[in-house]
Image: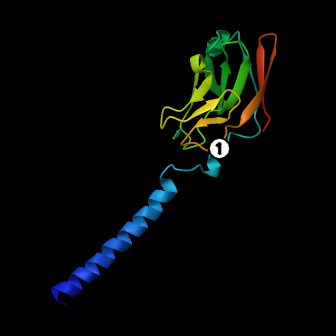
Amino acid sequence: MDRKEFLSVMGMSAASAVVISCLGCAKNSGSGSSPSTTGPTGIDFTLDLTASANSALLKNGGYLSSNGVLVAKTSAGAYIAVQLSCTHQNYPLVYQASASHFYCNNHGSAFTETGTVLNSPARNNLTTYKTTLTRHIIKSLRIN
Ligand code: FES
């Protein structure tokens, strides 16, 4: 094998490695969402606001997670609930009452209080849950 042949073979190998590597990157690059980023199903749970573990929900802007769901009390005092995991790559979301949105600290996606994507890289809306408050008990049910 002369030098020209050697370089030609090596160039082909390197090109093949790049293609394989990029196929892997595309699959895991985070540019899209995967089906596993939807919220949990079969959600039907209650939170007792008299329990100290749920005290975050007593003040406007507070939030907590339970059963894969993020439950928050808005600045206006309403209880809202969305899937805990970001639709981009499953990173746990936080609630930012001052901006009235859910935020992902991993890559910066944000979602409205009704779960709609505000900014990428997430492209899919959050699963939202119906919440009802009866006396001191919050009940969450999946609605989409
Ligand atoms: S995991 Fe990437 S924006 Fe949330």
Q: Residues within 10 Å of mark 1 (few under 14, many from 20)?
A: many
Q: Secondary structure under badge 1?
A: loop
Query: Which part of the image, by quadrant, shows the N terminus?
Result: bottom left
> Does the Cβ of the disc 1 residue fall within 8 Å of ligand 1?
no
Along the line of sight, the residue nearer the viewer: 5 or 52 = 5
Q: Residue 114: percent from the left, percent from the top?
A: 71, 29
Outermost residue toward the bottom in this view? 1
Query: Which part of the image, by quadrant, shows the C terminus?
Result: top right
Specify the color scheme: rainbow
* Residue depicted at x 52% and y 50%: 31
Q: Residue 60: percent from the left, percent from the top?
A: 65, 11
Numbered disc total: 1
Outermost residue toward the front in this view? 119
Question: Circle 1 sits on which residue?
Answer: 124
Give the left or right position of residue 71, taking residue 137 as reference. Answer: left
Q: Disc 1 marks which amino acid?
A: Asn
Along the line of sight, the residue nearer the viewer: 86 or 52 = 86
Q: In the rendered image of this protein, does residue 64 appear above or below residue 111? A: above
* Residue depicted at x 56% and y 43%: 88
Give the left or right position of residue 143, taking residue 92 as reference. Answer: right
Outermost residue toward the left in this view? 3
Q: Quadrant of residue 112?
A: top right
Q: Quadrant of residue 116?
A: top right
Q: Residue 102: percent from the left, percent from the top?
A: 60, 28
